[in-house]
Image (cartoon, rainbow, N blue to C red):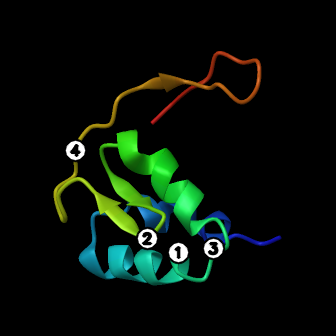
Amino acid sequence: MDYPCRSNPDLWLSTNPEDQYAAILACHTCPFEKPCEKIGEQEIRGVWGGVLRGRTGVARQPMRRVCQWRECSELFV
């Protein structure tokens, strides 16, 4: 299955209001919209399940995290 956020993941973390709106609209076509919204409740920015987290147009530094999906020590934001 092709999820909208996989084709252009940067769109979902953009601070550009036009990009944010496009991401929200794309979320409405995804079968995982509601589970993704639930996952994103703890996020400080980005579009998660069609819901914008954080303030629009303001870039904030996200918390650094350690990758949980594979055994690695890569840090990502």
- Percent coordinates x, y for residue 32 in the rendering: 64, 65
Judged left or right of residue 16, residue 65 is right
Q: Are marks 2 and 1 in contact (CB under 8 Å)?
A: yes
Of callouts 2 and 1, the N-terminal one: 1
* Residue identifier under label 1: 27
Q: Pick the quarter of the image with the C terminus.
A: top left
Residues packed near mark 1 inside 10 Å, few (<14), some (14 to 19) or many (20 plus): many
Of callouts 1 and 3, the N-terminal one: 3
Of callouts 2 and 4, the N-terminal one: 2
- Percent coordinates x, y for residue 12 in the rendering: 45, 64
- Dot 4 amino acid type: Arg
* Residue identifier under label 3: 4
Mark 1 or 3, which is nearer the eye? 1
Above or below, 45 relative to 20: above
Q: Are marks 3 and 4 in contact (CB under 8 Å)?
A: no
Of callouts 3 and 2, the N-terminal one: 3
Q: Are marks 3 and 2 in contact (CB under 8 Å)?
A: no
* Residue identifier under label 4: 60
Q: Pick the quarter of the image with the N terminus.
A: bottom right
Give the structural element (helix, strand or loop) at label 1.
helix
Q: Are marks 1 and 3 in contact (CB under 8 Å)?
A: yes
* Real-space CA distance between mark 3 and mark 2, rounded to the nearest whole angstrom: 11 Å
* Residue identifier under label 2: 50
Q: Quadrant of residue 74?
A: top right
Q: Quadrant of residue 34?
A: bottom right
